[in-house]
Amino acid sequence: MDSELLLERYAVADSLAMHFQTATDRARRSLLTLTALAAFAYNFHDSTCQWSLPFYLVALILAWMVWDQSGRFKMRHLDTRALAGRNAGTDGMAPGRYRRRRCRLLPV
């Protein structure tokens, strides 16, 4: 395989891995913020404060949606990081269980 093509593939896979890592971190911060807002709304719920229960439910639903998306970002990050490692020829440095679990998803 041509070394320039190999370096280009590594650069693309590495930049995608960094993008998905950033997206995962951003989703985790959003999840923590939404969870804190939901807890705040739940603590202030009583018969005089009618806005807190709908706010609590919306915050929980949004937190669940962010949590689901963050899992997808994390898997994409791991996939592209492993692909970058394979393109760089460092596949043997990955843990064995990760290689066995992920090798069927990665193109050769």
Image (cartoon, helix red, strand yellow):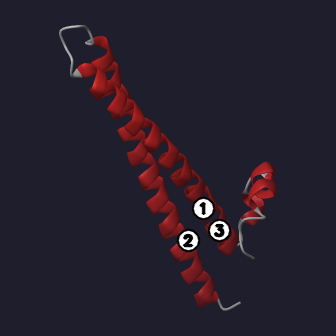
Q: Residue at x 42, y 53 (%)?
A: 23
Q: Nearer the viewer, residue 92 or 68?
A: 68
Contact (CB < 8 A) between labels 3 and 1? yes
Mark 2 lies on a secondary structure that is helix
Q: Give residue 28's quadrant in the image.
A: top left
Q: Which residue is mark 1?
A: 81
Q: Which residue is mark 3?
A: 83
- C-alpha span from label 3 to label 2: 6 Å
Contact (CB < 8 A) between labels 1 and 2? yes
Q: Residues within 10 Å of mark 3 (few under 14, many from 20)?
A: many
Q: Nearer the viewer, residue 90 or 108?
A: 108
The kind of residue on which mark 1 rests is: Arg
Specify the quadrant that holds the N terminus.
bottom right
Q: Residue at x 58, y 89 (%)?
A: 4
Q: Residues within 10 Å of mark 2 (few under 14, many from 20)?
A: many
Q: Which residue is mark 2?
A: 13
Between disc 3 and disc 2, whose residue precedes? Answer: 2
- C-alpha span from label 1 to label 2: 7 Å
**Residue 24 x %, y %:** 46, 49
Horizontal side of 19 relative to 72 (left or right) equals: left
Q: Residue at x 55, y 47 (%)?
A: 71
